[in-house]
Amino acid sequence: MNRRNFIKNGSLCTSTLLLSGALWSNFANTKNDKVYRIGIIGFGDRGSGLFNVLKDFPGKFVVNAICDPLDFRLDNAKKMADTNKVKLYRDHRKLLENKNVDAVIISTPLNTHYEIAKNSLEAGKHVYLEKAMTFTVDQAMSLTRIAEKHPNQTLQIGHQYRYSPLYYKVKKMIQDGYLGKVVQIDARWDRNWNWRRPVPDPSLERKINWRMYKEYSGGLPAELLSHQMDYIHWAFDALPTTVYGTGGIDFYKDSRETYDNVQLNIRYEQEDMIGNFGATCANKNDGYSFRIKGSKGMVSLLTDDGIFYPETETRKELEEVDGVSGATKIAWTENKNGISLVDSKLKDGSFYAFEDFYKAISENSLPDSNVYTGGNTAICVALANDSIYNGGMRKWKPEYNLSPQY
């Protein structure tokens, strides 16, 4: 975009840079008055959290079944749900036999995702499957083929940043050239916490703290960094060329198996771009950090807020748009170094994801986060973990490029 067009399109620039959370409702409208009956499989922190999110959709979803193999979680379900209306199960296969359940949410340990999603599709249910989609490369490719055999059912993957109004706007900024040529992504998700949940009985350690054991979990890359990886795939319509990772159990010497400190370097050769993705459990200063760096400017994102930092020449152009062309004023930050991207509080990302889940089921359309995109990200995570634990660089193979033509 040359300078003349940049100034000419000042109003477009302003509308792209300034985001109101209310705008998203225009994307999610669908003509349907059906209330879909939901079964939640896995009622830990995530499953119970999504149960609360669904309360915001009284005219679209109702939870009428909950499944978890652990008694104390079913006890929690009894406290949160009206058991006169919500049936409880210990075995997901029994829940899937319930003809009054239209769709399921799967929020179980990663190593169970493939089997439960497969069983759910074969039982005729729509599926909202938490990230990462699958544990292994082979499972991602297999679940894609299974989903294609059930074209009337929705399979949506829980990478909710694909639905965030903020992240949607940043994708548009990238596409419209406001960042220029993007060359680097720096993404972190840090914490200073051992990641452990309380265990009421020592025999339940591996079932409750499954994220710490390789048999069940993809560790930090799957549970945290997969969100940012998936967003890059989406925003740039890109997939990795090579994946290299390193890490270790560097702080919490507590018999865990998954690493508490990881760093990934991902090369996107066709885009001439490098992605750096890292997480540690031993320092929370950066917390969630997501910086997309281009020749015209950088976007710095939090989960629900963002700032655009223009480079010097881009800043001059924006100031002319802002002060001379008569365009709506750009929302500069207090220190005048950046431009705020959000002017109102956004909802939790899962809210926007459920809006699209309802739309996809109602219209039999492919959700933004689907079996193909979710499969690509699951493959990326699996390659990253293979590199982290076994050493060496992993190359992306052509057969990993999952798509509706697959």
Image (tube, helix red, strand yellow):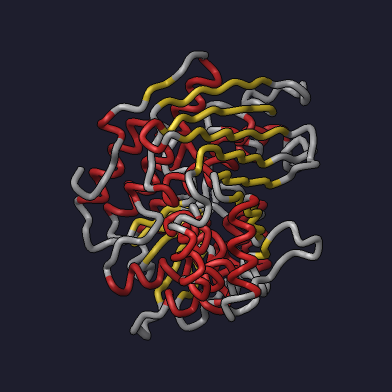
**Horizontal and vertical percent for residue 204?**
66, 36
Quarter of the figure with the N terminus: bottom left
* Residue at x-position 67% and y-position 42%: 189
Residue 72 vertical position relative to residue 221 in the rendered view, above or below: below
* Residue at x-position 56% and y-position 50%: 296
**In the visual, does 278 lie left or right of 192?**
left
**Horizontal and vertical percent for residue 344?**
67, 74
Residue 351 vertical position relative to residue 197 in the rendered view, above or below: below
For the question of whether residue 90 can be seen, the reply is no
Q: Residue lying at the far top in this picture: please name it.
A: 391
Residue 34 vertical position relative to residue 199 in the rendered view, above or below: below
For the image, the number of numbered tags is 0
**Horizontal and vertical percent for residue 10?**
52, 72
Q: Nearer the viewer, residue 44 or 238?
A: 238
For the question of whether residue 289 can be seen, the reply is yes
Residue 349 vertical position relative to residue 174 in the rendered view, above or below: below
User: Which of the 4 image quadrants contains residue 351?
Assistant: bottom right
**In the visual, does 375 lie left or right of 332?**
left
**In the visual, does 379 lie left or right of 55?**
left
User: Which of the 4 image quadrants contains residue 401?
Assistant: top left
Q: Nearer the viewer, residue 80 or 91?
A: 80
Q: Nearer the viewer, residue 108 or 227?
A: 227
Quarter of the figure with the C terminus: top left
* Residue at x-position 52% and y-position 14%: 391
* Residue at x-position 39% and y-position 31%: 269
**Horizontal and vertical percent for residue 376?**
37, 40
